[in-house]
Image: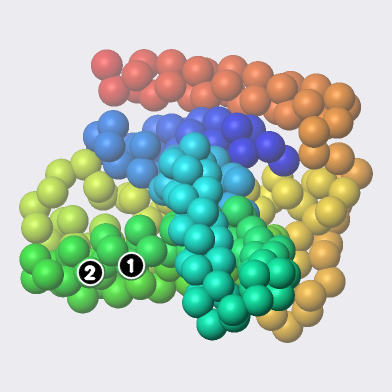
């Protein structure tokens, strides 16, 4: 389904989980848990989550700059080592065409996203943060280069996310940071909604990856189609109504 739908469903589910479990969480923790609903699409360079990490408009400018510099460098080297201008120009033209075919904008975005995650990890390491923090960013830097809808959309990734979030929650509690109690459960449920929703698309998801690459689908929704948009809107509306009722019931109980 569309990234916007994933984010809205993840946010509403996070609120419902917090209400049902009576977790006392702050807004920052709620936002953090909600964002995990779009984390599986980190392997898609044009996704909302990827854009959240590295703005697409900025990556386009960097891509054009890099290609421009490489083109000049190739042309300069070709002319320097070939006295025949026509041959040098032909070699440069072929080299540039090959380069632009291999180094696409999407590949550049993946590299930039990974670079930013690694940079954050190195920054945390420099300021002597616990290993958990900077090693997590190093590990996440690999995800953008994975094939879309495989590892991050499989069942095996769900317990890994829970373990990571549990470690994060324990660190928050240990450092007396209030409002993050229950973040492991909320974040994991929010993350899982992404996989559940994608199960109902025509493409499906490889639930048992890496043991099986076969995509499993429980529906026939084609993302972006008119019917799919209607179904997604109805789902969000029903979930919103249910969340309002849950909140009303919760505040009635505590008041």
- State whether residue 205 is above or below residue 212: above
Give the number of the disc on residue 118.
1
Which of the 4 image quarters holds residue 47? top right
Which of the 4 image quarters holds residue 151? bottom right
Label 1 neighbourhood size at 10 Å, few (<14), some (14-19), many (20+)? many
| Residue located 52% across and 48% down the image | 64
| Residue located 25% across and 47% down the image | 180
**Observer able to see residue 78:** yes
Which of the 4 image quarters holds residue 149? bottom right
> From the image, which quarter does the C terminus lie in?
top left
Q: Tell me: 113 left or right of 191.
A: left
Front-most of residues 60 and 21: 60
Front-most of residues 111 and 81: 81
Tell me how far mark 2 sits from mark 1, CA to CA: 6 Å
Q: Secondary structure at mark 2?
A: helix
- State whether residue 149 is above or below residue 135: above
Residue 140 image offset from top left, x and y in percent: 43, 67
Front-most of residues 219 and 3: 3
Mark 2 and mark 1 residues within 8 Å of each other at the beta carbon: yes
Labels in figure, total = 2
| Residue located 54% across and 57% down the image | 67
Label 2 neighbourhood size at 10 Å, few (<14), some (14-19), many (20+)? some
Residue under label 2, please give it.
122
**Observer able to see residue 158:** no
> From the image, which quarter does the N terminus lie in?
top right
Residue 248 image offset from top left, x and y in percent: 43, 16
Residue 241 image offset from top left, x and y in percent: 59, 18
Residue 178 image offset from top left, x and y in percent: 15, 44
| Residue located 77% across and 52% down the image | 199
- What is the basis of the colouring in this image? rainbow
Q: Secondary structure at mark 1?
A: helix
């Amino acid at each position: 389904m569309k990234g916007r739908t994933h984010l809205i469903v993840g946010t509403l589910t996070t609120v419902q989980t917090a209400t049902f479990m009576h977790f006392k969480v702050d807004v920052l923790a709620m936002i953090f848990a909600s964002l995990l609903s779009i984390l599986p699409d980190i392997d898609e360079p044009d996704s909302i989550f990827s854009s959240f990490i590295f703005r697409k408009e900025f990556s386009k400018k960097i891509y054009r700059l890099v290609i421009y510099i490489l083109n000049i460098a190739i042309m300069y080297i070709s002319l320097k080592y070939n006295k025949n201008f026509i041959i040098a120009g032909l070699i440069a033209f072929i080299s540039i065409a090959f380069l632009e075919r291999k180094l696409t904008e999407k590949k550049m975005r993946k590299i930039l996203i990974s670079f930013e995650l690694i940079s954050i990890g190195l920054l945390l390491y420099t300021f002597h943060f616990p290993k958990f923090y900077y090693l997590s960013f190093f590990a996440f830097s690999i995800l953008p280069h994975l094939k879309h809808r495989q590892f991050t959309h499989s069942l095996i990734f769900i317990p890994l996310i829970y373990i990571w979030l549990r470690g994060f929650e324990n660190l928050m509690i240990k450092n007396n940071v209030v409002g993050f109690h229950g973040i492991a459960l909320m974040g994991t449920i929010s993350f899982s909604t992404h996989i559940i929703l994608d199960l109902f698309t025509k493409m499906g998801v490889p639930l048992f990856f890496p043991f099986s690459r076969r995509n499993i689908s429980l529906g026939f929704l084609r993302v972006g189609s008119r019917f799919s948009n209607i179904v997604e809107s109805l789902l969000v509306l029903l979930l919103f109504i249910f969340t309002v009722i849950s909140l009303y019931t919760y505040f009635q109980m505590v008041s």
